[in-house]
């Protein structure tokens, strides 16, 4: 295959960009779907308001480690 | 997400719900959760709307094919809906800071 001289994996080394959302900001509400093996269920950030903290962990892709 | 699963009991004891989010479909994420023994919800941000709102949409290419994904990041959101801690990229893999902060919050309340 031609043209495979690209350096490893997409992201070049550059300093980490700061996040746009800062500590102290209101977390934007959302509603997303989760599958439990049977049904798709809605999960909203706001359903935890006043009840629980939420650790919201974004990850790159399923099945890619981490 | 395995590291969060390993700390899940501590986080739950400190009144914290863990939610994973990626730009996979909910179905892929369910299979991923099963494969890794993850019991907290892994949400599917199909199309990346929420990822974009959180400022985490990352564009890159693999072999010249354009791709989009989320950047790795953890936000700890308190009961009032405010961000009280955040970590990004490689520092977001280990949740121990998040666990410590949740436990601190629990002590305060």
Image (tube, helix red, strand yellow):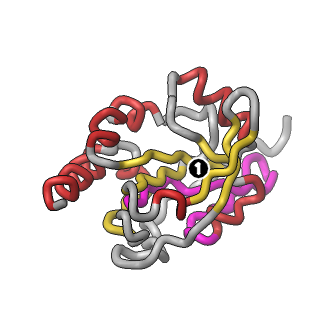
Q: Is residue B35 visible?
A: yes
- Place of residue A44 in the rendered image (x, y in percent of width and height, measured from the top left): 60, 58
Chain letter of disc 1?
B
The stretch drawn in magenta includes residue B36: no
Q: Give the residue drawn at x 51%, y 30%.
A: B39
Instruction: In this rendered view, identify the residue nearer to me: B31 or B61.
Output: B31
Asked if residue B29 is positioned above or below residue B78 in the image, the reply reads above
B46 relative position to A7: left or right: right
Q: Give the residue drawn at x 28%, y 40%.
A: B13
B27 relative position to A51: left or right: right
Q: Quadrant of residue B49?
A: bottom right
Asked if residue B90 is positioned above or below residue A46 in the image, the reply reads above
Q: Is residue A7 visible?
A: no
Q: Give the residue drawn at x 68%, y 62%.
A: B59
B99 relative position to B19: left or right: left
Q: Which residue is mark 1?
A: B21
The magenta span reads B53-77
Q: Quadrant of the C terminus of chain B?
A: bottom left
Instruction: In this rendered view, identify the residue nearer to me: A61 or A24.
Output: A24
Q: Give the residue drawn at x 71%, y 60%.
A: B48
């Amino acid at each position: 295959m031609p043209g495979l001289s690209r350096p490893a994996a997409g992201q070049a080394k550059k300093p980490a960009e700061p996040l746009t959302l800062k500590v102290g900001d209101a977390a934007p509400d959302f509603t997303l779907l989760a599958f439990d093996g049977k049904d798709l269920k809605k999960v909203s950030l706001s359903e935890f308001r006043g009840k629980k903290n939420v650790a919201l962990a974004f990850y790159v892709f399923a099945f890619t480690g981490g | 997400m395995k590291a969060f699963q390993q700390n899940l009991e501590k986080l739950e004891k400190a009144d914290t719900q863990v939610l994973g989010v990626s730009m996979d479909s909910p179905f892929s994420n369910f299979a991923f959760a099963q494969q890794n023994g993850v019991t907290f919800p892994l949400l599917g941000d199909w199309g990346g709307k929420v990822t974009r709102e959180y400022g985490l949409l990352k564009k890159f290419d693999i072999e010249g094919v354009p791709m989009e994904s989320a950047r790795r990041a953890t936000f700890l959101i308190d009961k009032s809906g405010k961000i009280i801690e955040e970590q990004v990229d490689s520092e977001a893999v280990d949740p121990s800071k998040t666990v410590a902060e949740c436990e601190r919050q629990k002590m305060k309340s």
